[in-house]
């Protein structure tokens, strides 16, 4: 490997590290990231003279990315990450003969909580290991973090105790939250770790409390005031004893397995692997720690890792099976998804019998899929079953093809993006319930009291047959009152919420139509440019294409919807029900900003602003924000760990600016 190739690996690792730690949106699996880091470590071992402070092996991955919103917290003790190894031999080579505490490595978001005289006073995320985000109020609503410690008789009168926990979202809660987000038409989480991170950082702590998070304690970080406590209950003497003390205080501590020989170390790691799927949350390895805290202190740490611990990472499990059936299902937007059923196999601790085949293009990439084919499967991120490749096919096997909608029989159409097949019938029964829930969700028409459960209840009661029936529910007040759990007050609130939704901005009404690929940004652009819905409905594809944020595919989708019988009927029905069809921003003069007409791409972690704050600032000064770099990009706003977008900007000769340069540009305007 050349030095230039190593630097390219640095950039790749920084890019993926930023996605994982700071944006909670990884593009590759943990296993793939670990393999990338291993390549870097091997190259640095061969060429130690190449190692610089820019190496991802020299730093903790995260950063306090939302400190502007949540406030910064400097940790009393650095929250370092762990050195990963991938074989028992590496664990044995690291071990120096000291007694160990072998513990599960929990895959969540690390946080530190501080107690003064038994009362929780501060909670923070790990951030970059030294500075994290203040999430105290959110952590108060996480199971496993006591607001007040148990009044154990051995506790001193006045003391300080800081504890490190891993905040996780149990798999069952993850599936529930994602199902709710999907029904509301919102972006779902990629995995429980992302879900835990996103939920813990929410501005609304009450929503955090609804997400079902759990904290597992695994380390006492700092103590003060325990000098006179008897040795049997004095913290920070033995790691294994600390975990027992944490249990007495009211935490849910991680389990500890003692090990004092190579055989015991290997047995403990295997035992954790064999039982990890019995837990409600994710594990991705086992941690071997020197049990004696005094020895830990003597060994110390590098800039990134403690020398007294090492993490053994489990490889992803893969198994082969045979497809027994292929069928299709349809979602809210009409996307028809093929699903493969196969001979049951055990993966990641559960019995797996099916996996999505995504779309026709995915099936083609596998070389065709058919009943009787033998396929290799795994659980993506140990949650979602996926087919990796076709190992063999029967000679007479016919590749599966999607033809009609499985619910209404309407012939499917291929998406213009080339990534799926769709049912064009907006009144398709399978789409209807999901569209209703999306229509009423908070970011769309915001109808309080009309969540997914109530929508299904009203459909089953025969009160909703089409979207416009929402606005005719006031004619069925007695029928509403007769439904289970529908008291006078709840019905009144529902009807008031429906009435209030009639006055939503035109941009929201456009989003509520449920047109694939048309979100609030397109609605806002249309509302600003045209006076009413009738004008918008009459636009040609060419006229729509010139609107900011509307490309050829979106323009054609809008055009087709408004000219379809179902789309036209839906808009007419909503208008007849009194829903607002008039723009409130049309013709409003807006002063030109410093970024007027500029398309800006944000990449990396900014020093003091979150990504959303930066986007709002850019838009407020006339700019547009794009997610990808192209020849049309005017500026690239780059922070730490900028990655491949920065490389592409440099290749295209696009101006790259820092956060400070952006603020100076706006101040001078």
Image (cartoon, rainbow, N blue to C red):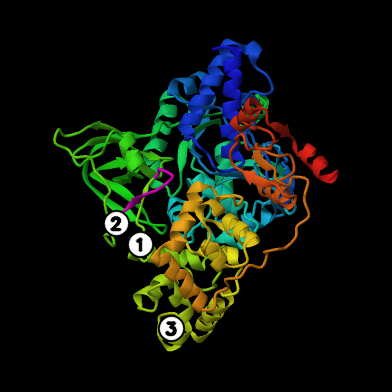
Q: Position of residue 364 (x, y in %)?
A: 31, 37
Label 2 and label 3: CA atoms lie apart by: 32 Å
Q: Is residue 458 left or right of residue 574?
A: left
Q: Which quadrant: the N terminus?
A: top right
**Residue beneath disc 3:** 480
**Residue 155 seen from this side:** yes
**Residue beneath disc 2:** 405
Between residues 344 and 563, which one lies in front from this camera angle?
563
Between residues 94 and 296, which one lies in front from this camera angle?
94
Q: Where is 565 relative to 273, above or below?
A: below
Label 2 and label 1: CA atoms lie apart by: 9 Å
Q: Looking at the image, tell me whether mark 2 or mark 3 is earlier in sequence order.
A: 2
Q: From which residue to which does the magenta span run?
A: 412-419
Mark 3 lies on a secondary structure that is helix
Label 1 and label 3: CA atoms lie apart by: 29 Å
Q: Residue furthest bottom?
A: 478
Mark 2 lies on a secondary structure that is loop
Q: Residue at x 59, y 77 (%)?
A: 500
Q: Where is 472 relative to 150, above or below?
A: below
Few, some or many C-alpha atoms within 10 Å of disc 3 (few <14, some 14-19, many ≥20)? many
Between residues 239 and 206, which one lies in front from this camera angle?
206
**Residue beneath disc 1:** 425
Q: Residue furthest left?
A: 396
Q: Position of residue 501 (x, y in %)?
A: 57, 73
Q: Residue furthest right?
A: 668
Give the tally of numbered discs. 3
Q: Which quadrant: the C terminus?
A: top right
């Amino acid at each position: 490997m050349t030095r230039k190739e190593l630097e390219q690996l640095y950039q790749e690792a920084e890019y993926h590290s930023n996605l994982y730690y700071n944006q909670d949106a990884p593009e590759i699996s943990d296993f793939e990231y670990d393999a990338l880091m291993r390549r870097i470590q091997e190259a640095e071992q061969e060429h130690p003279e190449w190692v610089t402070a820019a190496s991802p092996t020299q730093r903790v991955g995260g950063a306090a990315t939302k400190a502007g919103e949540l406030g910064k917290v400097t940790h009393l003790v650095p929250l370092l990450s762990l050195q990963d190894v991938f074989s028992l031999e590496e664990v044995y080579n690291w071990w120096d003969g000291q007694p160990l505490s072998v513990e599960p490595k929990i895959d969540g978001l690390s946080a530190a909580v501080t107690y003064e005289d038994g009362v929780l006073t501060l909670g923070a995320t790990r951030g970059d290991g030294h500075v994290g985000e203040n999430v105290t109020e959110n952590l108060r609503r996480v199971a496993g973090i006591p607001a007040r410690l148990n009044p154990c008789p051995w506790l001193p009168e006045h003391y300080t105790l800081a504890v490190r926990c891993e905040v996780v979202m149990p798999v069952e809660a993850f599936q529930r939250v994602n199902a709710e987000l999907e029904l509301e038409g919102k972006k779902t989480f990629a995995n429980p770790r992302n879900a835990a991170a996103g939920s813990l950082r929410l501005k609304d702590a009450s929503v955090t409390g609804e997400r079902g998070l759990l904290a597992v304690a695994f380390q006492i970080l700092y103590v003060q005031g325990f000098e006179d406590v008897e040795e049997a209950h004095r913290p920070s003497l033995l790691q294994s004893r600390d975990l027992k003390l944490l249990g007495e205080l009211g935490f849910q501590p991680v389990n500890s397995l003692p090990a004092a020989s190579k055989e015991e170390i290997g047995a403990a790691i295997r035992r954790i692997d064999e039982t990890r799927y019995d837990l409600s949350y994710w594990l991705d390895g086992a941690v071997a720690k020197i049990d004696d805290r005094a020895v830990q202190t003597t060994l110390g740490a590098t800039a990134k890792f403690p020398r007294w611990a090492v993490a053994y990472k489990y490889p992803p499990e893969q198994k082969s099976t045979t497809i027994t059936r292929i069928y299709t299902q349809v979602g809210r937007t009409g996307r028809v998804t093929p699903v493969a059923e196969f001979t049951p196999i055990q993966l990641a601790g559960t019995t797996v019998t099916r996996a999505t085949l995504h779309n026709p293009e995915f099936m083609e990439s596998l070389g065709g899929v058919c009943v009787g084919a033998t396929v290799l499967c795994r659980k993506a991120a140990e949650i979602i079953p996926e087919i990796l490749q076709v190992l063999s096919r029967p000679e007479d096997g016919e590749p599966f093809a999607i033809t009609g909608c499985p619910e209404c029989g309407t012939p499917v159409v291929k998406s213009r993006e080339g990534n799926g097949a769709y049912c064009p019938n907006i009144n398709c029964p399978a789409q209807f319930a999901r569209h209703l829930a999306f229509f009423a969700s908070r970011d769309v028409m915001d109808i309080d009291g009309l969540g997914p459960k109530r929508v299904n209840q009203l459909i089953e009661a025969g009160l909703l047959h089409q979207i416009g029936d929402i606005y005719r529910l006031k004619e069925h007040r007695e029928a509403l009152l007769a439904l289970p759990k529908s008291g006078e007050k709840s019905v009144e609130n529902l009807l008031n919420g429906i009435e209030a939704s009639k006055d939503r901005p035109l941009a929201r009404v456009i989003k509520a139509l449920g047109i694939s690929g048309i979100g609030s940004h397109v609605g806002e652009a249309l509302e600003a440019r045209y006076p009413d819905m009738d004008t918008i409905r009459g636009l040609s594809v060419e006229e729509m294409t010139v609107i900011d944020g509307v490309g050829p595919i979106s323009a054609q989708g809008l055009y087709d919807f408004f000219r379809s019988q179902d789309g036209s009927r839906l808009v007419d029905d909503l208008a007849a029900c009194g829903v607002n069809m008039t723009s409130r921003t049309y013709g409003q003069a807006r002063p030109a900003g410093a970024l007027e007409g500029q398309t800006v791409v944000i990449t990396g972690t900014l020093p003091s602003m979150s990504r959303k704050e930066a986007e709002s600032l850019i838009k407020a000064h006339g700019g547009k924000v794009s997610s990808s770099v192209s020849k049309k990009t005017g500026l690239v706003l780059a922070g730490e760990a900028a990655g491949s977008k920065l490389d592409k900007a440099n290749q295209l000769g696009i101006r790259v600016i820092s956060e400070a340069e952006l603020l100076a540009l706006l101040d001078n305007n």
